[in-house]
Image: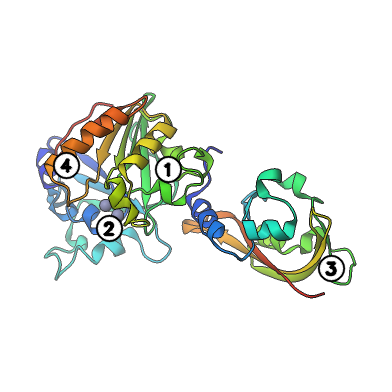
């Protein structure tokens, strides 16, 4: 694609100005952007790894439930928002690419434009005590 | 629109493309005489909304007390809600896409016989862009304007004025030059001049734009101008 949809362009602009961590995927599930605050938690600068296509995204970050048991992909909030076009929220633990395990709350929102066009997913997450 | 309407003769059908419903883009519509001529069919195309049809939204203006005639009293007109995508008008392929401007606003690319005209009268590509004007992937309007033979583009502000009107939905001279360069257009027609600019300041700005343009020609958008694509 030569250019992202306008809604994603504007959202990226907003996300780059906010200090809450934000993660953006396009309608195919490719990771197209995360902001500076998200870089702190994910343990790597976006420009060093991204964009990342949906296949390469699988397993990029180790993710578990809060008790350390496995979390199936289909229960990831971003996957729920992407596949069901519904908002999703949960707590989980993941290992940043800096090697540090962190506990976070994640909320993922499906992005729908005028005329019902599905554009992708926006997720925000914040660190909690485990 | 009134002057243009007077020139429409010996045709059975006219298409009117509206990018968005800001007043400066619709106020001429009711004075477009083919709308009142039952022998000419008029198709009006404008941006889709999730709440009301194009006709319902235009009705707010095209009805008393703002205007004496109601849309429903016009006999030979149809209104079409346009979502981002492609449609055809006779032999012309029209691509519509949302562009950076307050409220849902379309830009149009018209293509026929390998030639392309892009119309972006209200556009602030620098606002949403990452690393403007160097990253086409994250620049509003790029897909519409890429390689166009003629780009008619918002050229409202000087750089100083833009600094005080960030987010108002319009371009500075520097931005329009950068955008036209990024899109590698052939000819740029400056448009949507600031109403506060005099003919003199516009002439001066035009000379500076022509000198600064790299790789494309700059044509001043003037009242009644006709352009061959
Ligand atoms: Zn406008
Ligand atoms: Zn305007």
**Would you say B30 lies left or right of B180 here?**
left
Q: Residues within 10 Å of mark 3 (few under 14, many from 20)?
A: some
Residues marked 2 and 4 touching at CB (< 8 Å): no
Vertical relation: B45 (above or below) A65: above
Q: Residues within 10 Å of mark 2 (few under 14, many from 20)?
A: few
Give me the disc on residue B101: none
Give me the disc on residue B201: 4
Give the CA distance from mark 2 to mark 1: 19 Å
Which of the chains bears the disc numbered 2? B
- Residue B206 position, x and y percent, is 22, 34
Q: Nearer the viewer, mark 2 or mark 3?
A: 3
Q: Nearer the viewer, mark 4 or mark 1?
A: 4
**Would you say A106 lies left or right of B12 here?**
right
- Residue B153 position, x and y percent, is 31, 40
Give the CA distance from mark 4 to mark 3: 64 Å
Give me the disc on residue B22: 2
Q: Residues within 10 Å of mark 4 (few under 14, many from 20)?
A: few
Ligand 1 within 8 angstroms of badge 2 C-beta: yes
Give the CA distance from mark 1 to mark 3: 42 Å
* Residue that numbered label 3 is attached to: A65
- Residue B113 position, x and y percent, is 36, 24
Label 2 and label 4 in one chain: yes
Using the image as rendered, state which of residue B161 and residue B10 is in the foreground: B161
For numbered disc 2, what is the local secondary structure? Answer: loop
């Amino acid at each position: 694609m030569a250019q992202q949809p306008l809604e994603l362009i504007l959202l990226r602009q907003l996300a780059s100005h906010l200090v809450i961590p934000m993660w953006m995927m396009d309608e195919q599930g490719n990771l197209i952007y995360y902001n500076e605050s998200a870089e702190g938690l994910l343990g790597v600068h976006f420009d060093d790894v991204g964009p990342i296509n949906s296949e390469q995204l699988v397993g990029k970050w180790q993710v578990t439930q809060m008790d350390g048991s496995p979390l199936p992909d289909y229960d990831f909030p971003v996957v729920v928002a992407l596949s069901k076009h519904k908002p999703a929220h949960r707590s989980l633990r993941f290992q940043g690419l800096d090697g540090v395990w962190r506990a976070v709350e994640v909320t993922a929102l499906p992005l729908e434009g005028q005329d019902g066009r599905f554009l992708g997913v926006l997720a925000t997450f914040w660190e909690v005590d485990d | 629109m009134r002057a243009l309407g007077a020139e429409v003769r010996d045709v059975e059908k006219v298409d009117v493309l509206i990018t968005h419903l800001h007043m400066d883009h619709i106020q001429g519509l009711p004075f477009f005489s083919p709308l009142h001529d039952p022998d000419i069919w008029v198709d009006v195309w404008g941006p889709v909304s999730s709440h009301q049809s194009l006709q319902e939204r235009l009705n707010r203006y095209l009805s008393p007390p703002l205007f004496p005639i109601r849309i429903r009293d016009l006999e030979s007109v149809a209104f079409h809600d346009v979502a981002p995508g492609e449609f055809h008008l006779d032999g012309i392929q029209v691509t519509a896409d949302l562009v950076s401007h307050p409220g849902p606003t379309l830009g149009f690319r018209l293509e026929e016989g390998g030639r392309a005209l892009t119309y972006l009268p209200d556009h602030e590509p620098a606002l949403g862009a990452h690393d403007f004007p160097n990253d086409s992937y994250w620049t509003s309007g790029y897909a519409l304007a890429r390689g166009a033979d003629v780009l008619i583009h918002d050229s409202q502000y000087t750089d100083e004025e833009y600094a005080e009107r960030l987010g108002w939905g319009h371009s500075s001279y520097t931005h329009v030059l950068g955008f036209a360069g990024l899109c590698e257009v052939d000819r740029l027609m400056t448009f949507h001049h600031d109403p506060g600019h005099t003919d003199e300041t516009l002439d001066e700005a035009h000379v500076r734009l022509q000198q600064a343009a790299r790789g494309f020609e700059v044509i001043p958008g003037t009242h009644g101008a006709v352009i061959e694509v």
